[in-house]
Image: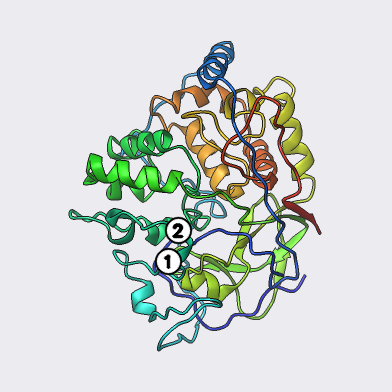
Amino acid sequence: MKPPQSDGRFNSKYFGEDRRNTGVQTRWGFPQPNTGGARRTVGTSARIFICALVLALLPVIRIGAQSAQEWKLPDIPWAFPVRDKVPPAIDEKSGPMHVPGSTKSYTQDQIDDLQNPPDWFPDEHTPMPRVVAHGAEGGVLGCASCHLPSGLGHPESANLAGVSAAYIRRQLSDFKAEARMGEAMNDVAKNLSDEDARQASEWFASLKPRVWQPVVETDRVPKTFINVHLMRMPLPGGADEPIGNRIIELPQDIAGAESRDPHSGFISYVPKGSLSKGKEFVTTGGGGKTIQCAICHGPSLNGLGEVPAIAGHSPMYLFRQLYYFKDGSRHGSMGALMKGVVAQMSQDDMLAIAAYVGSLTPGREENSSTKPTEGNEIKN
C-alpha cells in the first residue's frame, strides 16, 4: 500500500472537518461510495421503552463515574491521540489558500481562527447561527471550527449532521455538568447559553448525513504522527507498518483536511476480520455479552428519538465512546443505559463493533422494516 505524500502543510488548529461523499477517488485510489438514507415512521416512545426494558435485564455491573478531577486520558494512543513531542520537520505554506470548487480564499491563520472558521461553500447550507459561525462570549468557540459547516467533523470530533436536536442538547448539558468527560467540549460548553445550545442543536440536526469515511480492512497502514493540533497524518516518506489491533483514520487528501474542506473526507483502516466480528456483535449480541444494537438505535442504527444515530460515524470516535461508557467517563442520564451494554466488552470487541457500525450507510430517519445498509467498506 502506498500512502499519500505530504504536500508540506501539517498545521491546522482545528480538530474538526466536514464530511461529505463526493464520489471522487481518494489519494490511495479507493472510491468513496454513494450514500442512502431511510425514513422513520415507527413509534419512537414504544421502542425506547422496549430498549430500557431489555437493558434492565442485563447483568448489573457497577461502573464508577469519573469527575473532572479524576479523569485522565486513556493510554490507548491510536484512539486517544497525543501530540508527538518531536514532530517531523514540515515546510509550511503561506499566502491565500483555496479548495477545489470554491471561490473563497483564506490564509492559514484565518483557517485556524477558532471563532471564525472557514466556510468554503456557504451556498450548500442554511445560514449558520452566530454561535456556530463565530462562537460566543466566555471562550465559546465557533461550533463549525471542529464540526464544520457540514456537521461531519474530523475523527477527533463528533459527527452531528442529522443527529436529533434533543440528543445534541442533552450532550451539551452533560458536558456542562461534567457528566460526560474526555472531550474538549467541557470547556466549550461551560459558558454556552441555553439559547445558543438550542440554535446550534437545531441547525446541526437539520443537516444531511452523508458517507464521510470508507472503512478499509487491511493488514498494513501508513506510518503516522500526531501533529500539534491533534491531527493524525501520514509520515513523509511513504513507509508503512502492521495495523495490529488498531483503527487508523487518515485524510483522503492532506491539504483538504488542513484547509477543512467539507468535500474532502477520510479513510478508516481497520484490521482484517473486524467487520464480520463486529456484525456478529451488533446483530446478535455477541453470544450473550451484550444486546443487539438495533433494539435501542433502530433497525438501521440511524437513531430513535434521543437515542442517537451511529451508522456511518467515525469508527475511531465510536470506539472512544464505548470506552468512555465502560470506564465511567460518560455517566449522564442516557449514558446510564449503556453501562450494562458495554460491561462485558473487551477493547477488541469495541474495535470490531465500531468498525462494522462505521461501515454502514448513515441516514436521517428510519422505519420499523429498515435494516442496516452495508457497503461503506472496501476490502483491501
Q: Relative to 220, is 113 on the left or the right? A: left
Q: In this picture, is 68 found above or below 15?
A: above
Residue at the location (71% across, 26% down)? 369
Do the CB atoms of the residues marked 1 and 2 lie less than 8 Å apart? yes
Q: Position of residue 203 (x, y in %)?
A: 39, 48
**Label 1: which secondary element:** helix
Q: Residues within 10 Å of mark 1 (few under 14, many from 20)?
A: few
In this view, which residue lies farthest toward the left?
Answer: 137
Q: Provide residue 67's location: percent of width, then percent of height.
A: 32, 35
Would you say 246 lies left or right of 189 here? right
Q: Looking at the picture, which amino acid does disc 2 mark?
A: His
Closer to us: 301 or 330: 301
Residue 77: image location, x then y, percent: 53, 54
**Residue at the image position 45 percent from the left and 28 percent from the top:** 335
Give the labeled residue for mark 2.
Answer: 125
| Amino acid identity at mark 1 | Pro
What separation in Å lies between label 1 and label 2 (alpha carbons)? 6 Å
Q: Residues within 10 Å of mark 2 (few under 14, many from 20)?
A: some
Give the vertical position of 349 relative to 263 (above or below).
above
* Residue 288 seen in render: yes
* Image quadrant assignment for residue 343: top right
- Relative to 102, residue 67 above or below: above
State the residue position of label 1: 122
